[in-house]
Amino acid sequence: MNSLKKFLIENGASDVGFADLSGIATDHLRSGVAIILRLPEEIIRSIADGPNMDYYNLYFEMNDKLNVLAKLGAQFIRDNGYEAIAQTTGYVKEIGNYRTQLPHKTVATLAGIGWIGKSALLVTKKYGSAVRLTSILTDMPLDYGVPVTKSMCPRECYICMNACPGKAISGKLWDQTMDRNEFYDPLKCREKALQLSKERMNKEITLCGKCIEVCPYTRKYINRQG
């Protein structure tokens, strides 16, 4: 196992992958490190009827843990003589319409960890869409994964689309040439998630999770764990 991947997994990452960012990186930092954390299966089961306080608390706990992992990984890289930027929540900024310059999901698909589902979430074979992620940008040479360029969701599967309370999912299959708005409406998603968060938890936050909970790949994950 690559020493960086081994280090990150030993510190709590669920999975790690490496991406060649040539052609999309804006500077010389053309290697990407995708870091994945799985959501606990009991939390996924608990949000079948909507977001709850356990899910809310986990959201912030996982943000903190992902930030720590990104910083640890970046320092590991620097200690080995290379440059690195940890794409923490404090570093990444929205550039409009709920977009970022280089999304963690893009790094993850280029690293071969998963694909973009109809819900616009990263989907992995092992954990379904029950994952949170972060990334590191670096000039360190890495053993890149094989990029995933097309959806692995079944064309005839509309489970997440039908379950979405905000009707934000069109049902179209993603591929790397598509813009997110061609198959998913972030405004509808956020508006409904904010409403549900207020109703269920009295919190001003956009948490829902229904598309995660119903995803067949997620169901396989939680059934294995159960």
Image (tube, rainbow, N blue to C red):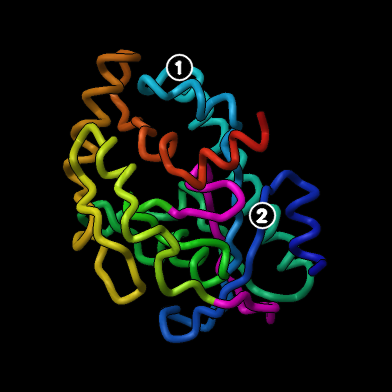
Give the x, y percent position of residue 22.
49, 85
Residue 151, by quadrant, is bottom left
Amino acid type of the residue tagged 2 in the rendering: Asp
Q: Is residue 9 left or right of residue 44?
A: right
At horizontal 42% and vertical 18% (from top left) the residue drawn is: 52
Q: Going by the picture, which residue comes out furthest to the bottom?
A: 23
| Residue pointed to by mark 2 | 15
Residue 73, by quadrant, is bottom right
Check the image and report above or below for 203 versus 181: above
Check the image and report above or below for 75 versus 26: above
Decide: few, some or many residues near mark 1? Use Cα within 10 Å; few <14, some 14-19, many ≥20. Answer: some
Using the image as rendered, state which of residue 110 and residue 90 is in the foreground.
110
Q: Mark 2 or mark 1: name the one nearer the start of the chain.
A: 2
- The residue segment tinted magenta is 122-146
Residue 138, by quadrant, is bottom right
At horizontal 67% and vertical 34% (from top left) the residue drawn is: 225
Let me know if residue 134 is in the magenta part: yes
At horizontal 60% and vertical 65% (from top left) the residue drawn is: 33
Give the x, y percent position of residue 175.
34, 71
Q: Is residue 201 left or right of residue 186?
A: right
